[in-house]
Image: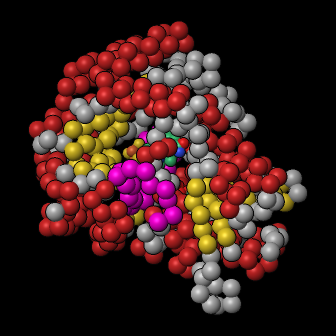
């Protein structure tokens, strides 16, 4: 049986060349490891992962899985239509969008997998292989799926998440087209915090960790596959540093094996978890940059976001990291309903004061992402609904589109907010010359490729 897996993605998305969808690699490796084969014999599943819909069509798979974030949901629907037209094979949807909003399920999909996908997808594939079709009676027995019964969208009970993450094999990287020495790794799932604008809470109710042995073996495997071309490692965890004991064990291994000499790493942290000891660990492991959500220069706004950090925490984190040679890349969000002029100004001041100590920074207009509490708020206010054009959720600052943005500001007028957007764009361009050069390079590449 041949399965095609694809992430619905804007073909112009600027990081496409440097990234690969980890989630599809997990689905593939889990499927292969736990597949029982057609008659209890060895698994004969062949899997392809690609980002080009035409490659999926040309490969003529027996079943296709599409992964989609909310911003790409319209693209996912288009992909599914094309697959149905050209191949007429089952199309299974998965990912954070449909997990957050099963009500937006479309009939072009045969079914969707909601939440953690490995086990559910394996059951779905198994069912299709045995029966050659999906019938309501069978689907009802699979936890964690969404399907259509006539006109009604049916959701089966949620599937409990894995207690021991190590049961999931490493994502099968041999299936990706890797175009750079930059690799991605996930060492945990979930985050113990509940920020208002953040979506993963819905997917991962608790924080779970892959064991250090699992993580170490994964890095060894990446080295085995890519050798010295492997130069950069991004840890994609929501919060990499939540467990200091685990980090210490990884640090020891990084040091003993010389990984810290050979590979530059980066990860997501939280300001309030940064102290001298933590910064030293990160520095020892050659984490040259760490990202954290500073969000605002105003404590009022941080409180509104339920961030559970303060401006003082952010300042201390920037200083400590800087002193240990780890450069922070904080991200800021603008446009909270309660954000007043002085709050915008406080964020500008924070950036002005600290930019020399930073490797860069990000600024995002506030977006109500499905799966977050903010989505519920915006829905109640009538700002969003389940039929919006999903690409409008793109959190772009430099290409900010005043006509498609979902405004949530209440304390200031739209006009004042737009003036601030302009000021933040200028601030970004002024202090992020490297990012601006990179952007220019990508634009040139795009225009050369037509
Ligand atoms: C790492 C990351 C990235 C990396 C991806 C790097 C990489 N190589 O993988 C980068 C930086 C590139 C990125 C970019 C963006 N990201 Co991001 N990202 C994440 C993050 C932190 C982790 C993703 C991850 O690897 N999770 C681990 C995997 C295993 O989980 P998963 O993807 O959910 O997949 C599981 C299930 O969903 C399901 N599943 C998924 N797909 C499929 C498909 C099928 C067929 C099946 C059956 C099941 C299934 O099974 C999987 C395994 O259990 C998440 C937050 C989070 N914790 O999920 C945000 C997150 C997914 N990102 C988000 C956003 C908004 C973006 C951007 C739009 C931001 C931007 N424009 O700057 C872009 C869009 C990129 C794109 N593809 O178009 C949002 C999405 C919200 C939403 N409702 O859509 C999240 C949830 C963060 C948030 N703001 O709350 N991101
Ligand atoms: S923003 Fe960061 S700290 Fe807050 S819930 Fe999301 S991942 Fe956790």
Q: How is the image coloured?
A: secondary structure
Horizontal and vertical percent position of residue 218: 35, 68
- Residue positioned 65% across, 55% down in the render: 55
Q: What's the magenta region?
A: 174-200
Q: Reply yes or no: does residue 311 show up in magenta.
A: no
Quadrant assignment for the N terminus: bottom right
Q: Is residue 429 visible?
A: yes
Residue 323 shown left or right of residue 434 in the figure: left
Q: How would you classify the magenta stretch by its main secondary structure? A: loop
For image coordinates 53% across by 37% down, the residue present is 13
* Residue at the image position 43 percent from the left and 34 percent from the top: 305
- The quarter in which the C terminus is drawn is top right
Residue 7 in the image, given as x and y percentages of width and height: 59, 51
Rendering coords of residue 366 (x, y %): 49, 29
Quadrant of the rendered structure where residue 434 is? top left
Where 297 sits versus 270, above or below?
A: above
Q: Which residue does the image show at 12% across and 43% down from the upper left?
A: 324
> Can you say whether 183 is above or below 158 in the image?
above
Residue 193 drawn in magenta: yes
| Residue 238 placement (x, y as % from top left) | 39, 50
Q: Is residue 240 visible?
A: no
Q: Is residue 283 above or below residue 12?
A: below
- The image quadrant of residue 135 is bottom right
- Left or right of residue 138: residue 179: left
């Amino acid at each position: 049986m041949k399965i095609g897996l694809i992430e619905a993605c804007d073909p112009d998305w600027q990081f496409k060349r440097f990234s690969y969808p980890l989630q599809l690699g997990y689905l593939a490796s889990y499927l292969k490891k736990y597949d029982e084969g057609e008659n209890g014999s060895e698994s004969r599943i062949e899997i392809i992962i690609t980002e080009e819909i035409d490659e999926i069509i040309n490969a003529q798979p027996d079943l296709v899985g599409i992964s989609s974030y909310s911003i790409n949901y319209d693209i996912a629907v288009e992909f599914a239509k094309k697959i149905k037209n050209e191949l007429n094979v089952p199309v299974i949807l998965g990912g954070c969008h449909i997990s957050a909003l099963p009500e937006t399920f479309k009939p072009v999909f045969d079914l969707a997998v909601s939440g953690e996908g490995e086990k559910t997808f394996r059951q779905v594939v198994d069912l299709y292989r045995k029966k050659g079709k999906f019938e309501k009676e069978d689907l009802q027995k699979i936890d964690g799926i969404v399907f259509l019964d006539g006109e009604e969208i049916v959701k089966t009970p949620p599937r409990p998440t894995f207690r021991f993450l190590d049961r999931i094999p490493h994502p099968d990287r041999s299936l990706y087209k890797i175009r750079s020495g930059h690799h991605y790794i996930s060492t945990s799932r979930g985050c113990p915090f509940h920020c208002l604008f953040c979506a993963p809470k819905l997917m991962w109710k608790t924080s779970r960790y892959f064991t250090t042995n699992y993580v170490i073996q994964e890095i060894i495997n990446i080295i085995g596959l890519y050798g010295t071309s492997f130069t950069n490692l991004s840890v994609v965890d929501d919060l990499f540093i939540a467990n200091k004991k685990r980090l210490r064990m990884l640090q020891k291994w990084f040091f003993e094996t010389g990984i810290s000499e050979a590979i530059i790493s980066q990860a997501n942290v939280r300001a309030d978890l940064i102290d001298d000891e933590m910064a030293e660990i990160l520095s020892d492991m050659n984490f040259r940059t760490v990202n954290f959500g500073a969000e605002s220069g105003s404590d009022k706004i941080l409180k509104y976001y339920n961030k559970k950090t303060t401006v003082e925490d952010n300042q201390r984190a920037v200083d400590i990291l800087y002193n240990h040679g780890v450069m922070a890349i904080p991200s800021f969000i603008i446009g909270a309903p309660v954000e007043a002029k002085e709050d915008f100004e406080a964020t500008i001041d924070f950036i002005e004061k600290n930019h020399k100590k930073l490797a860069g920074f990000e600024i995002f207009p506030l977006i109500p992402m499905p799966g977050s509490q903010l989505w519920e708020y915006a829905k109640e206010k009538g700002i969003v609904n389940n039929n919006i054009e999903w690409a409008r959720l793109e959190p772009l600052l430099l290409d900010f589109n005043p006509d498609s943005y979902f405004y949530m500001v209440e304390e200031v007028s739209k006009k004042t907010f737009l003036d601030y957007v302009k000021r933040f764009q200028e601030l970004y361009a002024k202090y992020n010359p490297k990012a601006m050069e990179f952007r220019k390079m990508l634009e040139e590449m795009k225009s050369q490729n037509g």
